[in-house]
Every structure is written in structure tokens, then in C-alpha cells.
Image (cartoon, rainbow, N blue to C red):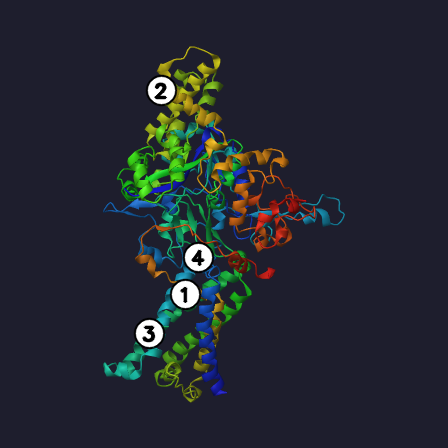
């Protein structure tokens, strides 16, 4: 069981994540979009969306620090476990609260605003379920385990296991002793990563940072080649194939 | 000097009767799909009026276009690039569907399927977006012909800029129609605000397009465009806009809106301009200098130095010749009749307008004056401050000079041509008073009043020289069509153009519907529901070219 969850699942999920993105980027440029619903409703979105997105960016930053930077490195530069814990719990709680509040507003909006509800696809619903579960369990880990529950040193177990995945020396047994809430969080996030490339979450990888440096107006020449007649047929009409 | 070519349009507002044919045929060709139900790439609005979307000209609110920052540098009114990116998760200045209007249809089925009852069954309005019952409270031309009265018309953002006395009188004095498409600007703020770089200006003809593969749905362009001519497709999550019917103009035939214009008021032609001067012209300090600055950007296609530079820049002889014969150049530069729409947005728009003299003539006639006497007209243009000042807000950032000059030339043309037609003794002072020679007035009259298809549309392209023969197709005998020389342009276009209703863009129950973009003006298949014959929907692979062959019609 632990091999399946902590060795097979991560590799399946990460492979799907990588290959799925490559496949979709090559074959579905037309479907690669945020599919924003701001056309339908703006007031709640302007409240919830920045909270969610900026909160999540901070959360992801925290994960990079906690998972990818080994404990020995931070100790080498003189950061004690106590200091690390204080900073990570404070920042994590703040960022997590913003994210949870944001996603709550956005989900409320999605359910109550008729036009937004109608614009929600089945894929969106599956994605929202795992995204919300990942956020809620993650928030529980930060607040329930680390803030109120006295703290769990995931950097000695979860982080080591996670880094092991990338050096092909993963130790699934490291995960078996971790608190249940951490295990649940890890599984939901792995599934979310697995389905990521087939959802609108792909827009994350289109973060348009190039906008800051490119010229304002883009000129392009007429494409001398005949456009591929089937290219849009695929994107527009799945039901016709 | 860096010469570039641009396809530009001029509309003669004196001739617009507000019939909306351009809007309807454009919609049939381009936005008759889910996700863009609310979108009209071409719309006609009554002025004064709120426009579409409502009050789009209020840039304090919508933040469209460019402005000069404190250092005098051109920046997007909506903010710096960094600010744009920080607002990417929720655009604070974006109109919602409600600002355009909630698109709707009617529950016609109920008329047929309602059980017997004492009352007549009704077809309830249903939202095209949610499918739920809706109240019809606004539309793309809700205030047509000043509908709604002062309560609605008073919300026209331009009226706010006029003096109080002028505002009170406007209703009795004038009204005209303003058809609008994308301006295909020289300095497009939509393209400048696109984070993905998906909106581009075509180097060959200046048409501004959205790359549907590169657009990621950040929707900054909707705010960036001050004319609100970028529409967000809420189904595909991509921005869409007027394409200047590029599949048609590429082969030398005019846009659908021009082709179907009942009043024949649209002109399409090539303008050569100096791309190196655009940024400087868009940055002039005083808003009122923007119109003359843009005129300075245009190059004289008859100047041998310009021709040499154009050839050096790789512009073909056919395009240079088209620029020399351009009706648009004559209206904009030679006669200075046509004026840009809202030059103060600093986007350097390329769809220009001949301001309407008719409201002035109407007032004169209604008050018992001779509406075609040059003295009366000149007096009225000056006395009726309202049209001139309002038109100036629309076309010259409030500078009444160019509007008055344009109207005076139109008035002089009327007076001069009446003398010609009635065989009266010609009065050369009429022409001189507007700094034209009598011969110039007469050729201006020919261009405005009787220009034929090939004079109104001078579009270079593969089959362009044949394009004027197509006009006969829409009104002429079907025997002229097949295999005839006029078919060439359509055949080429049909082969080039890929988007037809077979690719899932049409509602499922209308897959056999015809697409007006490649309609040859002859076939009736697919135009009417339920005739069972094969429209272009039946050709299946999207290439409608085969439909022009005789066997496909039979």
C-alpha cells in the first residue's frame, strides 16, 4: 500500500503532469486559456480572485522553501527549527487564510451566479473538488497540526521523501509514519497534479512575464503557408469526430 | 521613412439610414455562434445616444486607449505594464455582459406546444447565456432613433462635454447614425495591452487580428480598446474582434459590411503611411493636434520619393497603384472631408467618417429655408452650434474647425451641383469659398454621389481586378455566375477561408445553415429552414469551394 501511494502514484502523477502538458501544448493551443468568467460577474470575482491567486502564489513559494530546501541548509545558515517553525506557520497561516477565503468566495460565486454555474464544465467540477480538498487539507496541516497542535517536523519526513522522488531514491517508508492529514493532503495534491494538464489550470504556465519586455505593438506577416484545415476542427468540434 | 500600407475605410454618414444591414450580415458571417451572442463586430448606434456597450466613450470609467504620462510619454490609460500584470487576476475596468446587453431569444416552441387554453400562448424571452427566463431591458441599439427619450439619451458621455444650453436643445435639432467596426488603428492599444502578444497588426495590410492559438484569455484587451471593439468569447475563453473580413479583402473583395451596405456609403482603399512617425504623432501634447498629426503620418502615393521608398520596403506595384487610386486617400487627404473617430484616444484609428450635413439641411428645410442655398447652409453650419460642437467631440477632440470646414465643402458641393443640374449660371465663388476648383468639386461629387463598386472599393489582391464584376451576382441573373469571370474571387476566397458552420460553431440544429462569408449571392440552399437540400453544411470538410460547381448546386 505504501509503495502504491508513495512510489507509484507520485510517478504516475508527475509523468501525467509532464507528458500531459507537452501533449496539450502541442495539440490544443486553442483550448489553452484561463476561460475567465469575468464577463458574467465582476464584483465577487474582483474580491475573490486576487485573494485566491496571490494567496496561492505565496503558498506555492512556501512549499518550495519547505519541500525543496533541505533542513541541513537552513541550519547551516543558523536558522533554528524554532525560528523556521515560527516563520513558516505565520506566513503559511496568512497565505493560507487568503487562499481559503478566496476559493470560498469563488466557489460561492460559481454556485450562486447562474451564468457562471452554466459555464462550468464537468472537468471544472472535478478539478475544483481536488483543488478545494488540497487547499482545505493543507490549511488543516498548517493551522491544525503546526499552529494549534504543537507542530510536526515535516522537513525530516515529507520533504526528504519528496526530494527523493527527483533523485530516483524515494523512500516510501518515510511517509507511512506521518500524520494522516499530511498523507491525505499529499494524495489529493498528487491527483491534482495528475489531472492538471487536462484542466484550465494550464493557464498557470502562460504567466505572461514577457509582456514586461516586449514592444507594445506586435507586427506579424501574413502566414504564407496554407493553414491546416483540421487544426480548428479539433478544437471546436469534439462532438463531430 | 519607413513606408507601410494600410487598408482603411471611410463611411459617409450623410448616407447612413440606420438600417442595420451591415450589422446583421456581419453577425451572420462572424458572430452567429455561442459565446459571442452579445458581440456585434459591426454595430450602428444613433447619436446622440449611449452607444454600445453603454457609455463606452466614458474613458474616465473604462480607461481605454492611451494617454500622456507626466513626462509626456505615451502610456496606456489603464496603467503601466506592471500594473496590468498585477490586475491580471481580476480586471477592474472590464465591462460585463450586462454593459453590452444580456442576449436573448424567445421560447417559440411554447407557441406550438402549449395545451389548449383560454389565453393566447406567449413566447417568453429566455437568456441566451443561462437559458433561464429573462427580462429584456437593453440591447445593442436600444436607444435607436433617440428611443427612450432624454432619460436615456442624456447619458451620452459626449453630451456631458457640451454646454448646458446646447444640451437642452439637442433633441429638436439633430440625430444621425454612426456605424462602427474595429478601427484597425496604427497605434492599437488593444495589442499593446495584450499580455500574451496574441493581438498583432499585419505588416502587409495593417489589419489587427487576434491569434486564437496564442490568446490565453487575460482579457486586458477588452479594457485597452477605447472603442470596445474587442469581445471576449465566454465559451472559448478567447478574445475576438472584427477581422476586416480578411479572407475577402485578401482576394480583393470588400468586407461583408461594405458589400451589403444599402446606402453604399462605405469606401475601402489603401493608405501609405510612415511607420516611423506614428509614435511621435500619437504623442503630440494637445488633443486637438492629433487629427492634423495623423494626416501628417499619411504619405502622398503620387510622390516619386514615396513610391521609391515603398518599393524599397517591399510593397508591390499593385499595392502602390491601389494607393494612388485610393478613394480613402482622396476623402481623407485631398478633400479633407473624412475625419477620424475620437483621435483623442491616441490610437490613430483608420476607419474615418464624412460628417453628416443632412441634419443641418433638415433644420433649414423644416424652418422654410432653402436647404441647398450656399448662403443659408454656411450660415446654418455656424448658427447651429449643436451639430458642429457635438460632431467635433466625436471626430476632432472638440476642435470645431475641421468639422466646419468639412461641412462647408459638402454644402458648397450641394449648392454648386444644384446649379449644374438646373442649368443655372455657375458661380465659381462657391468653390473658391471652400478652397476648391469647380472641377474638383465635381469630381468630389462623383466620388460621393455616384461612385461605382470599383471606385468605392480599390482593394489590391489576387483576384482584385475582377472583384467589381461580383456585384452583379448579388442582384443579377444566376446564369452569369458559374464559370464566369466573376466567380474567380469567390472561388479563391472559399478555398482560403476555413471557418464554416460545419466545424461545430453552429448550433446543433442549424448545421446546414449557410455562411454569408462564402455565399456566392446565387444559391438558396441553406438560406431557408427545412428545405432538406444540402447547404455548405453538407460538404463536411469545411471547404465550401466545391459548392460553386454546377453539380453541387443541382
Q: Nearer the viewer, mark 2 or mark 3?
A: 2
Q: On the picture, is A88 further left or further right than B488? A: left
**Screen quadrant of the C terminus of chain B:** top right
Coordinates of residue A230 in the picture (x, y in percent): 53, 58
Same-subunit check for callouts 4 and 2: yes
**Mark 4 to mark 2: distance in Å?**
54 Å
Q: Nearer the viewer, mark 3 or mark 1?
A: 1
* Chain ID of residue with mark 2: B
Foreground of the two, B65 or A46: B65
Q: Residue furthest right?
A: B116
Foreground of the two, A241 or B81: A241
Contact check, label 3 and label 1, Cβ < 8 Å: no
**Mark 3 to mark 4: distance in Å?**
34 Å
Q: Earlier in the sequence, mark 3 or mark 1?
A: 3
Secondary structure beneath disc 3? helix
The residue labelled by disc 3 is A90
Coordinates of residue B100 in the picture (x, y in percent): 49, 46
**Mark 1 to mark 2: distance in Å?**
64 Å
Q: Which quadrant would residue A57 be assigned to in this image?
A: bottom left
The residue labelled by disc 2 is B437
The residue labelled by disc 1 is A204
Q: Nearer the viewer, mark 1 or mark 2?
A: 2
Same-subunit check for callouts 2 and 3: no
The residue located at (57%, 61%) in the rendering is A238
* Chain ID of residue with mark 1: A
Amino acid at each position: 500500500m505504501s509503495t502504491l501511494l508513495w512510489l507509484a502514484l507520485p510517478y504516475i502523477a508527475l509523468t501525467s503532469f509532464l507528458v500531459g502538458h507537452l501533449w496539450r501544448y502541442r495539440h490544443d493551443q486553442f483550448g489553452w486559456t484561463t476561460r475567465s468568467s469575468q464577463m458574467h460577474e465582476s464584483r465577487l470575482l474582483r474580491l475573490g480572485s486576487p485573494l485566491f491567486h496571490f494567496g496561492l502564489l505565496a503558498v506555492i513559494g512556501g512549499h518550495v522553501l519547505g519541500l525543496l530546501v533541505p533542513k541541513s541548509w537552513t541550519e547551516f545558515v543558523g536558522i533554528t527549527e524554532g525560528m523556521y517553525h515560527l516563520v513558516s506557520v505565520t506566513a503559511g497561516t496568512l497565505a493560507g487564510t487568503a487562499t481559503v477565503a478566496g476559493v470560498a468566495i469563488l466557489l460561492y460565486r460559481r454556485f450562486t451566479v447562474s451564468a457562471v454555474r452554466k459555464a462550468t464544465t464537468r472537468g471544472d467540477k472535478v478539478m475544483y473538488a481536488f483543488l478545494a480538498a488540497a487547499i482545505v487539507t493543507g490549511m488543516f496541516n498548517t493551522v491544525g497540526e503546526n499552529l494549534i497542535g504543537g507542530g510536526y517536523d515535516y522537513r525530516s519526513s515529507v520533504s526528504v521523501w519528496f526530494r527523493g522522488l527527483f533523485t530516483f531514491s524515494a523512500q516510501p517508508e518515510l511517509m507511512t509514519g506521518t500524520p494522516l492529514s499530511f498523507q491525505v493532503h499529499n494524495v489529493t495534491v498528487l491527483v491534482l497534479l495528475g489531472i492538471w494538464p487536462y484542466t484550465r489550470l494550464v493557464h498557470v504556465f502562460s504567466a505572461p512575464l514577457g509582456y514586461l519586455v516586449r514592444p507594445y505593438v506586435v507586427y506579424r506577416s501574413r502566414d504564407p503557408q496554407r493553414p491546416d484545415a483540421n487544426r480548428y476542427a479539433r478544437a471546436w468540434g469534439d462532438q463531430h469526430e | 521613412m519607413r513606408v507601410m500600407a494600410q487598408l482603411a475605410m471611410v463611411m459617409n454618414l450623410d448616407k447612413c439610414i440606420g438600417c442595420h444591414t451591415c450589422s446583421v450580415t456581419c453577425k451572420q458571417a462572424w458572430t452567429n455562434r455561442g459565446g459571442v451572442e452579445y458581440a456585434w463586430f459591426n454595430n450602428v448606434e444613433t447619436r446622440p445616444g449611449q452607444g454600445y456597450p453603454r457609455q463606452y466613450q466614458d474613458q474616465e470609467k473604462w480607461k481605454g486607449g492611451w494617454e500622456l504620462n507626466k513626462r509626456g510619454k505615451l502610456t496606456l490609460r489603464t496603467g503601466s505594464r506592471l500594473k496590468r500584470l498585477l490586475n491580471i487576476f481580476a480586471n477592474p475596468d472590464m465591462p460585463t455582459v450586462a454593459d453590452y446587453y444580456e442576449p436573448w431569444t424567445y421560447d417559440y416552441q411554447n407557441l406550438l406546444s402549449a395545451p389548449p387554453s383560454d389565453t393566447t400562448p406567449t413566447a417568453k424571452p429566455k437568456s441566451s447565456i443561462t437559458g433561464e427566463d429573462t427580462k429584456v431591458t437593453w440591447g445593442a441599439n436600444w436607444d435607436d432613433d433617440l428611443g427612450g427619450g432624454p432619460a436615456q439619451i442624456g447619458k451620452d458621455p459626449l453630451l456631458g462635454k457640451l454646454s448646458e444650453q446646447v444640451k437642452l436643445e439637442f433633441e429638436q435639432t439633430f440625430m444621425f447614425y454612426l456605424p462602427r467596426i474595429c478601427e484597425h488603428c496604427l497605434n492599437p492599444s488593444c495589442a499593446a495591452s495584450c499580455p500574451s502578444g496574441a493581438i498583432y497588426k499585419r505588416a502587409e495590410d495593417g489589419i489587427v487580428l487576434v491569434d486564437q492559438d496564442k490568446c490565453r484569455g487575460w482579457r486586458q484587451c477588452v479594457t485597452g480598446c477605447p472603442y470596445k471593439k474587442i469581445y471576449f468569447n465566454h465559451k472559448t475563453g478567447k478574445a475576438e474582434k472584427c477581422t476586416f473580413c480578411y479572407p475577402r479583402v485578401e482576394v480583393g473583395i470588400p468586407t461583408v459590411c461594405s458589400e451589403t451596405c444599402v446606402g453604399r456609403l462605405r469606401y475601402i482603399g489603401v493608405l501609405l503611411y510612415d511607420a516611423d512617425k506614428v509614435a511621435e504623432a500619437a504623442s503630440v501634447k494637445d488633443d486637438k493636434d492629433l487629427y492634423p498629426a495623423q494626416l501628417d503620418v499619411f504619405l502622398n502615393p503620387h510622390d516619386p520619393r514615396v513610391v521609391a521608398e515603398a518599393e524599397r520596403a517591399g510593397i508591390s506595384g499593385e499595392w502602390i497603384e491601389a494607393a494612388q487610386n485610393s478613394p480613402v486617400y482622396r476623402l481623407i487627404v485631398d478633400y479633407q472631408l473624412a475625419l477620424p473617430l475620437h483621435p483623442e484616444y491616441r490610437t490613430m484609428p483608420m476607419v474615418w467618417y464624412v460628417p453628416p450635413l443632412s441634419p443641418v439641411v433638415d433644420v433649414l428645410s423644416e424652418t422654410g429655408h432653402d436647404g441647398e442655398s450656399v448662403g443659408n447652409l454656411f450660415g446654418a453650419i455656424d448658427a447651429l452650434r449643436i451639430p458642429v460642437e457635438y460632431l467635433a467631440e466625436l471626430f476632432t477632440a472638440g476642435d470645431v474647425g475641421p468639422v466646419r470646414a468639412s461641412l462647408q465643402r459638402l454644402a458648397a458641393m450641394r449648392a454648386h451641383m444644384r446649379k449644374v443640374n438646373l442649368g443655372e449660371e455657375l458661380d465659381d465663388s462657391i468653390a473658391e469659398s471652400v478652397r476648391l476648383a469647380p472641377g474638383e468639386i465635381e469630381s468630389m461629387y462623383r466620388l460621393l454621389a455616384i461612385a461605382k463598386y470599383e471606385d468605392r472599393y480599390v482593394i489590391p489582391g489576387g483576384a482584385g481586378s475582377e472583384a467589381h464584376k461580383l456585384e452583379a451576382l448579388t442582384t443579377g441573373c444566376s446564369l452569369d455566375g458559374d464559370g464566369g469571370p466573376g466567380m474567380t474571387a469567390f472561388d479563391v476566397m472559399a478555398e482560403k477561408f476555413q471557418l464554416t458552420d460545419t466545424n461545430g460553431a453552429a448550433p446543433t440544429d442549424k448545421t446546414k445553415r449557410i455562411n454569408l462569408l462564402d455565399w456566392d449571392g446565387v444559391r438558396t440552399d441553406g438560406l431557408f429552414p427545412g428545405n432538406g437540400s444540402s447547404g455548405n453544411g453538407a460538404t463536411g470538410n469545411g471547404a465550401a469551394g466545391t459548392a460553386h460547381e454546377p453539380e453541387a448546386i443541382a
